[in-house]
Amino acid sequence: MSDNNVTYDFDEFWAEKEEQDKKIKVLGTVYSLPPSPRASVILKLMKLKKEVGKKAAIPEEELIEMAEEIIGPKEMRRCLKTA
């Protein structure tokens, strides 16, 4: 079977598990993020770019929703309150 036809790549999954989390600092708080973005965020970005165009700005509410998916709604509310 060719790699192009693979639906679930466990080799990639296991390799990613060995990667270190990425750390970001936002408004004085350090967040630990997974090595690769969540599929839901990538799919939302792809959908938005298709709807509004590659060079168009992403609406603020959409960016906030994606950030909530990454750091969680509670932390996102804290960031918005602090900013």
Image: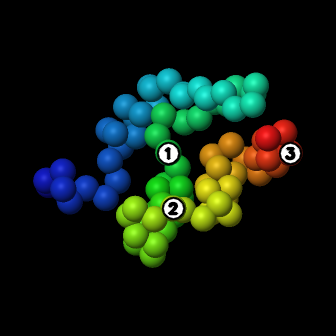
Q: Secondary structure at mark 1?
A: loop
In the image as oriented, which residue stretches furthest toward the left? 2
Provide the residue designation for mark 3.
81
Measure the C-alpha gap from mark 3 to mark 1: 25 Å
Q: Is 67 drawn above or below residue 11 in the view shown?
A: below
Provide the residue designation for mark 1.
37
Mark sitting earlier along the chain (2/3): 2
Which quadrant does the C terminus fall into? top right
Q: Secondary structure at mark 3?
A: helix
Q: How is the image coloured?
A: rainbow
Q: Is 25 drawn above or below residue 7 in the view shown?
A: above
Is there any visible trace of residue 69 in the rendered image?
no
Tell me the residue at 68%/63% (across/down): 61
Mark sitting earlier along the chain (3/1): 1
> Badge 2, how many Cα within 10 Å: few under 14, some, many 20+?
few
The residue nearer to you, when weighing 83 against 26, is: 83
| Circle 2 or circle 3, nearest the eye | 2
**Residue 57 — which label?**
2
Q: Tell whether 6 sits left or right of 60.
A: left
Check disc 3 and give the amino acid type: Lys
> Badge 1, how many Cα within 10 Å: few under 14, some, many 20+?
few
Mark sitting earlier along the chain (2/1): 1
Q: Quadrant of residue 51?
A: bottom left
Q: Position of residue 71 (x, y in %)?
A: 68, 43
Q: Position of residue 70 (x, y in %)?
A: 63, 46
Tell me the residue at 76%/25% (across/down): 28
Check disc 2 and give the amino acid type: Ala
Q: Position of residue 45 (x, y in %)?
A: 48, 60
Q: Position of residue 34 (x, y in %)?
A: 54, 36
Which quadrant does the N terminus fall into? bottom left
